Image (cartoon, grey):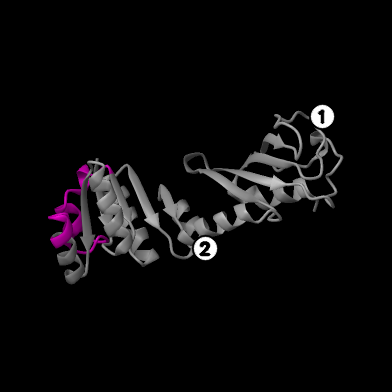
Amino acid sequence: MYIIVVGGGRLGYYLTKALLSEGHEVLIVEKNAAICERIVDELGSVCIRGDGCEMATLAEIGTVRADMLIAVTGDDEDNLVACQVAKHKFNVPHTIARVRNPKNETIFKKLGIDVTVSSTNIILENIEAEVPTHPLIHLLTIRDKGLEIVEVKIPPDSTTVGKPVKELSLPQGSRLALIIPKEHKPRVPTSDTILRDGDRVIAVTTPESEEELRAALRGA
């Protein structure tokens, strides 16, 4: 694959190094001349000095034949613009953007960026997995379908304890996929399945319905 990496900082450098080791053709676009020179000295001719947000630069490096563009500068706006130009002007099939401010993830997705990566959210999700009292844990994002796979634990004081699934007011588009009891084997829930204290419920939902799903499973 021909992969363009916009941003030659530490993230861009190590990402490029890993991609090269896997046999990909990779080119870094970096504004800073000193950084670009250092990358060339260490990795060879895999870095060009330029602005990855500019059409002229992207045209010069053959973005039209790129399989993927990854924007990992320290500026969310630059990452967004680089991905948009690549996708809409050069028809790059896959774009990935680093997002420093988690609040920007929704905007990036709405504007057509294929994948967003927020280091803040990655750290938070790992914290969530280690905190047993956390109400909702993200397990997987299915970005092209706009779906999330999440885990919700039923606390002992929940108003849903003892209720069958059919009595829950689940948000539209949400489905319960698996229930993992404290002391029994996991089971696929039916409409008559009773929720118990300590059950871990694996569900499929949309990002917009996460809070509503959590309330439906744990009690408003």
Q: Which residues, given as a range, are shown in magenta?
A: 41-67
Instruction: Please indicate whether residue 187 sits to the left or right of residue 192 in the image.
Output: left
Residue depicted at 68% across the width and 55% down the height: 134
Q: Earlier in the sequence, mark 1 or mark 2?
A: 2
Q: Residues within 10 Å of mark 1 (few under 14, many from 20)?
A: few
The front one of 89 and 95 is: 95
Residue depicted at 80% across the width and 31% down the height: 193
Residue 172 visible in the snapshot: no
Instruction: Please indicate whether residue 114 sits to the left or right of residue 93 in the image.
Output: right
**Residue on which the image places disc 1:** 192
Under mark 2, the amino acid is Lys
Label 2 SS: helix
As for residue 40 lying within the magenta part, the answer is no
The front one of 42 and 171 is: 42
**Residue on which the image places disc 2:** 103
The front one of 161 and 113 is: 161
As for residue 48 lying within the magenta part, the answer is yes
Instruction: Please indicate whether residue 66 sits to the left or right of residue 173 in the image.
Output: left
Residue depicted at 18% across the width and 58% down the height: 57
Label 1 SS: loop
